[in-house]
Image: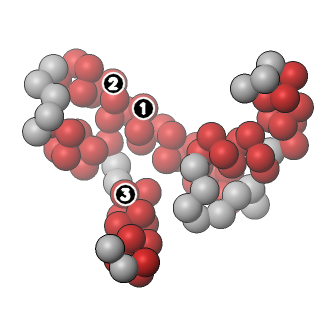
Amino acid sequence: MPRNKECNRQEILQEMKAEEWRKMIKEIVNDDERLDLLAQLLEEAEEAKQVLRDKGYGWTGLSLLATVKEEVPSAKIVTKHFNI
């Protein structure tokens, strides 16, 4: 896949809300309660990543976990201490 198409795909996925994730995943998961929990978790993760971006941490394409582990100073100390 050409790089620009991959970037567009990532941007679209990053902007998806819980209901959109729910619709996409519904095809493979048939447990509404677990699906709702997963969709909410994905939405919260994207919101957390956006909060970090707004505060100047990380960049587009860097995962939430990588942003926290590599970019947030207080998290660097914790993740190193607990070997995360």
**Residue type indicated by callout 1:** Leu
Q: Which disc number belongs to residue 13?
A: 3
Question: Contact (CB < 8 A) between labels 1 and 2?
Answer: yes
Q: CA distance from mark 3 to mark 1?
A: 14 Å
Left-right relation of 26 to 6: left
Q: Quadrant of the N terminus?
A: bottom left
Please name the residue shown 62% across and 40% down the image: 65
Foreground label between 3 and 1: 3
Circle 2/circle 3 CB separation < 8 Å:
no
Horizontal side of 2 relative to 64 (left or right) equals left
Relative image position of residue 27 (x, y in whole percent): 11, 39
Q: Which is nearer the eye, 75 or 47?
A: 75
Q: Is residue 15 visible?
A: no
Query: Mark 2 vs mark 3: which is more N-terminal?
Result: 3
- Tell me if mark 3 has few (under 14), some (14-19) or many (20+) residues whose alpha carbon lies within 10 angstroms of its own: few
Give the Cα distance between marks 1 and 2.
6 Å
- For disc 1, the marked residue is 41
Which is nearer the eye, 6 or 71? 6
Q: Image check: 33 left or right of 69? A: left
Looking at the rendered structure, the secondary structure element under dot 3 is helix
- Which image quadrant for residue 56? bottom right
